Image (tube, helix red, strand yellow):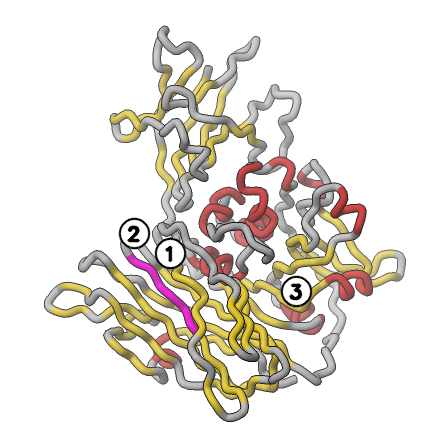
């Protein structure tokens, strides 16, 4: 099979492109530094990539974008010997209320929020560019990965060499996660399942806030795979979106890596409230009773976390899968998270004027939560104590609450209870603290 995915990483690959107000440093593209200050914007343009004939394309990027900075990936394709106009996939930063690009149709090009479709024509080449922006002369975004993957036409999909492999991933039930983040939670759970097997200890809610697409509801899937790949990189995990086949998934399992895919849901599932296409994590392949099965972590399969480990007949999986996969690699031990932070807080009672209300204190200063913290997209939750009837041994069982008087109302039981409180803002920053009541 011809190579349909191209990834640019590290200095040598980036240096083959065109640098305009940017430079390559420490295997990343960053803004030029002039007299001790970063320039406000710059652009990196790759060399054109010859590709097999294709009718759809997806772009991936991994970038550090601290507050006050952003990146914007664009692509153009070669059709009938001519380059199309540049197509943008929206500005990206964890600190932005970022929005995927709205649908646009121009000739044979159809731009969707996270992919580019070609109608009646086939592309032969693609070229990438990414803009770097900064409002702070002391900060620059840094691009570590830039990639493109295309859906080939007139190619027979390869099944690859069968593999009997089983990865140990943490399952999460979507019913137990933050209701306000439900449109993005299936994808966030799949990402957390992959990262946490490598010891990341991330909450799906943290992922959901960073990969969230804030565009107004439209006719397209609210989940944006471009943003999800960029979100994984915020914790140091290289990730990209690829068009593939069964051979690709089998190769990933053989390498000890899982994959995030979307599957068509059945009529009964849709009637029960499951999205028409749901995100799951592929965790292996096995022969069960002599029948080939795909092993999944499906967050919609049950209301109990560990019942979300399921198996699906291979033929049924191949019918429901759209051929798109989000792939990930383990982070290197010397790479710190790219700006995502957790902060520890003391949790103290307000006093007799507000019984059962507790507020957060950071470095001795009161951290009052806004009354609309949850309404604006934040997540406030506490873990269930061991004696709670719904507590399980699963990874952090939550109850979700609203702020009250700038703090948290914690119910008292007949016995002393210990709570762990989590406040996660829309940029994925988390404040966590323990309290006994």
- Residue 71 in magenta stretch: yes
In this image, 356 relative to 414: left or right? left
Residue 82 visible in image:
yes
| Residue occupying the far top of the picture | 352
Q: Is there a contact, CB below 8 Å, between mark 2 and mark 1? A: yes
- Cα distance, mark 3 to mark 1? 31 Å
In this image, 365 relative to 348: left or right? left
Number of residues whose C-alpha sits closer than 10 Å to that of mark 3, classed few (under 14), some (14–19) or many (20 or more): many
Task: Identify the residue at image location x=57%, y=64%.
Answer: 327
Determine whether the residue tagged by mark 2 lies in a helix, strand or loop.
Answer: loop
| Residue occupying the far bottom of the picture | 81
Q: Position of residue 290 (x, y in %)?
A: 89, 61
Q: Which residue is mark 1?
A: 93
Q: Which residue is mark 2?
A: 67
- Numbered circle sitting on residue 253: 3
User: Does label 3 or label 1 sit earlier along the sequence?
Assistant: 1
- Quadrant for residue 122, please give it: bottom right
Determine whether the residue tagged by mark 3 lies in a helix, strand or loop.
Answer: helix
């Amino acid at each position: 099979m011809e190579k349909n995915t191209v990834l640019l990483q590290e200095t040598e690959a980036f240096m083959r492109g065109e640098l305009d107000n940017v430079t390559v440093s420490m295997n990343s593209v960053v803004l030029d530094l002039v007299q001790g200050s970063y320039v406000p914007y710059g652009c990196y343009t790759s060399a054109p990539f010859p590709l097999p004939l294709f009718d759809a394309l997806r772009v991936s990027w991994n970038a550090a974008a601290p507050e006050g900075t952003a990146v914007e990936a664009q692509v153009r394709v070669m059709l009938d010997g001519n380059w199309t106009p540049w197509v943008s996939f929206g500005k990206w930063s964890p600190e932005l209320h970022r929005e995927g690009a709205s649908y646009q149709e121009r000739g044979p090009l159809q731009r969707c929020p996270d992919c580019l479709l070609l109608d009646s024509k086939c592309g032969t080449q693609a070229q990438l560019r990414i803009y770097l922006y900064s409002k702070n002369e002391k900060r620059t975004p840094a691009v570590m990965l830039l990639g493109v993957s295309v859906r080939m036409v007139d190619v027979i999909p390869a099944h690859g060499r069968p593999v009997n492999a089983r990865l140990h991933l943490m399952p999460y039930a979507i019913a137990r996660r933050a209701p306000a983040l439900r449109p993005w939670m299936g994808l966030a759970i799949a990402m957390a399942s992959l990262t946490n097997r490598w010891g990341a200890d991330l909450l799906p809610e943290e992922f959901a806030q960073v990969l969230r697409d804030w565009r107004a509801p439209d006719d397209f899937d609210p989940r944006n795979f471009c943003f999800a790949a960029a979100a994984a990189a915020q914790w140091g995990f290289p990730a990209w979106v690829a068009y593939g086949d069964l051979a690709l998934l089998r190769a990933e399992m053989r390498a000890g890596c899982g994959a995030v895919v979307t599957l068509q849901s059945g009529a009964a599932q849709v009637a029960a409230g499951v999205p028409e296409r749901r995100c799951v994590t592929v965790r292996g392949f096995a022969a069960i009773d002599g029948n080939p099965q795909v092993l999944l972590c499906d967050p919609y399969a049950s209301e109990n976390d560990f019942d979300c480990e399921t198996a699906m007949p291979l033929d049924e999986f191949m019918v429901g899968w759209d051929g798109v996969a989000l792939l990930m690699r383990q982070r290197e031990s010397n790479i710190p998270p790219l700006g995502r932070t957790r902060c520890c807080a003391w949790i103290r009672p307000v006093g007799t004027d507000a019984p059962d209300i507790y507020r957060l204190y950071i470095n001795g200063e009161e951290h009052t939560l806004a009354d609309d913290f949850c309404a604006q997209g934040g997540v406030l939750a506490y873990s269930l104590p061991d004696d709670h009837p719904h507590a399980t041994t699963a990874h952090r069982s939550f109850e979700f609450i609203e702020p009250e008087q700038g703090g948290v109302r914690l119910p008292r039981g007949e016995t002393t209870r210990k709570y762990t409180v989590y406040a996660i803002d829309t940029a994925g920053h988390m404040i966590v603290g323990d309290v006994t009541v």
